[in-house]
Structures are given as structure tokens and as C-alpha cells.
Amino acid sequence: MTTTSRQLLSSCKRIVVKVGTSTIMYPNGTINLQRLEKLAFVLSDLKNQGKEVILVSSGAVGVGISRLHLSERPRTIPEQQAVASVGQTELMNLYSKFFYGYGQIIGQVLMTRDIVEFPTSRLNAINTFEQLLVKGIIPIVNENDTVAVDELDHLTKFGDNDRLSAIVAEITDADLLIMLSDIDGFYDKNPNDEPDAVLFHEIHTITDDLYALAGGKGSSYGTGGMSTKLIAANHILKNTSQMVLANGEDPTIIFDIIDGKQIGTLFSAD
Ligand SMILES: Nc1ncnc2c1ncn2[C@@H]1O[C@H](COP(=O)(O)OP(=O)(O)O)[C@@H](O)[C@H]1O
Ligand SMILES: N[C@@H](CCC(=O)OP(=O)(O)O)C(=O)O
């Protein structure tokens, strides 16, 4: 019997998990505490199994909107940044509480694109991740929304956490990126609009034809939709790593993915 790429996932040692806003918020704009706690449980257990885990979590803006009791996402960039500042604090407070409950210590890493564009700051970031992992601390990463601004011609913004998670996987030399979203994987069309959409179980190369099948975001808090997930997958494949896109509705799905079960869409070179 030949060993498939799926079966090899169980040997992955360093794993980056990305959760989108849609995974950690209820559609009514409040925080899904049950899911956050389950995520902390799963990642803590993986750590106990001897894996190294890094969490890339969106949600600063969503949680900030909830904390400030706003009825909608503010329109101006400075307002969104202020909201993200509140939300990031709240988000880390919750993660800290849940991970602490499972015996883990977390460390916050806020990143901007220029960190990885410049060799010195890139190396500093790599060193920080390495030290956190060596010390058994779980890094929790987000974009530094209060300083990363779209409008400034300063190469600061990743633009979305899908791409950020692929860059984190690259600079930490991770074996696997698990991207959790509100959908079961990558389909040949948006299944929310077209019920006969067909799921891709495995993708080996990202082509223009695939990009053409990727639609926009599914929730009012998320950014990017499927196209940024494909850009992330392309980045991962170029760095000879692998990525699984799956539904984060039940975070214990991560155990099944690592067990090699056919879940979501696997992006791998073979
Ligand atoms: N081809 C496709 N396959 C799967 N989902 C798609 C596709 N095209 C568009 N989508 C949409 O992408 C959404 C996920 O992206 P997004 O809302 O940015 O999630 P997240 O907050 O997890 O990053 C899905 O809910 C779905 O509506
Ligand atoms: N830094 C932003 C991330 C926005 C983002 O990429 O969201 P998502 O598409 O839900 O992963 C935040 O924390 O709200």
C-alpha cells in the first residue's frame, strides 16, 4: 500500500492554524466562546502530543465591534483601527484564559508586512517565534491593525490573515498550515450561492482557472474570501509545504485532519 499525502500529515511536527473571524464570531456579532474554548483545547492537546503549534487568529475588528456594542463595522480606517485595538486586547484576554485552563502559556505576535520585507526585522521575527516555541509557548499572531494602513504607500499591510498565515508558515518553516473557515473547503463555485458546487479534495497547483472559481467573502466581518485563501495556498506550495482548508465549525476537526482523514481541501505538491 502506498502512503498518501493525507497519511503523511500525521508526521507533521510544526503546525500553523489560522482561524477567520467567521469561525470565532456568531453571525449576530457576538463572540463564539464555545468555539474559542474548543480551539484552545485542541491546540493544547496537540502541544501535549509533542507538536509545535502557532495560531493565527483574526477577530480584532469583529470582537472590538462586539465589545463596543457597535451596530456595524465603522467606515473610516482610524475608527476601524481603534476598534481593532480594543478587540485585540479582548481577544487575547479570552485566549489567555482558555489556554491557561489547559495549562498553556501564550505569546502575542503582531505583524506588519514590512517586518518580513526587511532582512533584519524578518530575522527578529523568526528568532522570536523560535524562542517562543523552544520555551513551549503558543504564539498567537494577528496583523498589527493599528499601524498597518492600506492607504499609506509604506508596504505595511498584509491585507488579510490568509496571506499572513502563509507567511508565518514560511518564516517558521512549518510542515502544515490548517486554515479554518466557515466552509468545508474549496469548491468549483461558491456553495452558498450554488448548492450543486463540488468540493475539491486535493489541489496540486494553483492555476488561473482556479482563481476564476474563487468568490468573495462569506460574512460581514471577514476579508478576502476564497481568492486570498488560494493566494495563501500558492505561497505554501511554492515553499514546498502543505495546507488544508476546512470548516472550523468544530475545531476538533483538526485532530481528524492530522489523522489523515479526507477532510476539506488539501493543497500539496503531490
Ligand atoms: N469557490 C468557493 N469555494 C468555497 N467558498 C467560496 C468560494 N467562493 C467564495 N466562497 C466564499 O468564501 C467564504 C469564506 O471566506 P471568508 O468569508 O473570507 O472567511 P474567513 O472569515 O474564514 O476568512 C465562504 O463562506 C464562501 O461564501
Ligand atoms: N486583522 C484583522 C483580520 C481581518 C481578516 O483577515 O479577517 P478574516 O478574513 O476573517 O481572516 C482582524 O483581526 O480583525
Image (cartoon, grey):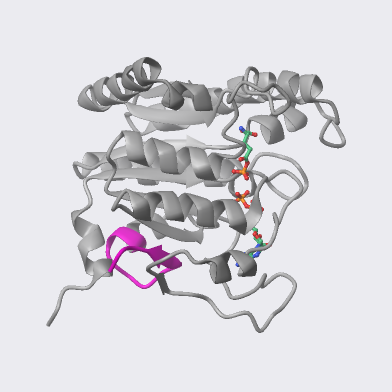
* Residue 104 found in image quarter: top left
In the rendered view, tell whether residue 67 sits above or below residue 28.
Answer: above
- Please give left or right for residue 44 compared with residue 210 in the image: left
Quadrant location of the C terminus in the rendered image: bottom left
Percent of width and height locating residue 25? 66, 44
Secondary structure mostly taken by the magenta-highlighted segment of the chain: loop
Quadrant location of the N terminus in the rendered image: bottom left
Percent of width and height locating residue 225? 65, 54
> Residue at position x 48%, y 61% from top?
246
Percent of width and height locating residue 90? 61, 23
> Residue at position x 75%, y 42% from top?
29
Residue 223 in magenta stretch: no
Percent of width and height locating residue 264? 45, 67
In the rendered view, tell whether residue 50 sits above or below residue 149.
Answer: below
Span shown in magenta: 257-270
Is residue 57 at least partly visible in the picture?
yes
Closer to us: 114 or 90: 114
Closer to us: 119 or 182: 119
Q: Quadrant of ligand 1?
A: bottom right
- Please give left or right for residue 98 compared with residue 210 in the image: left
- Please give left or right for residue 2 compared with residue 145 in the image: left
Closer to us: 94 or 213: 213
Is residue 111 at least partly visible in the picture?
no
Closer to us: 23 or 170: 170
> Residue at position x 25%, y 68% from top?
5
Most extreme residue toward the left is 1
Q: How many marks?
A: 0
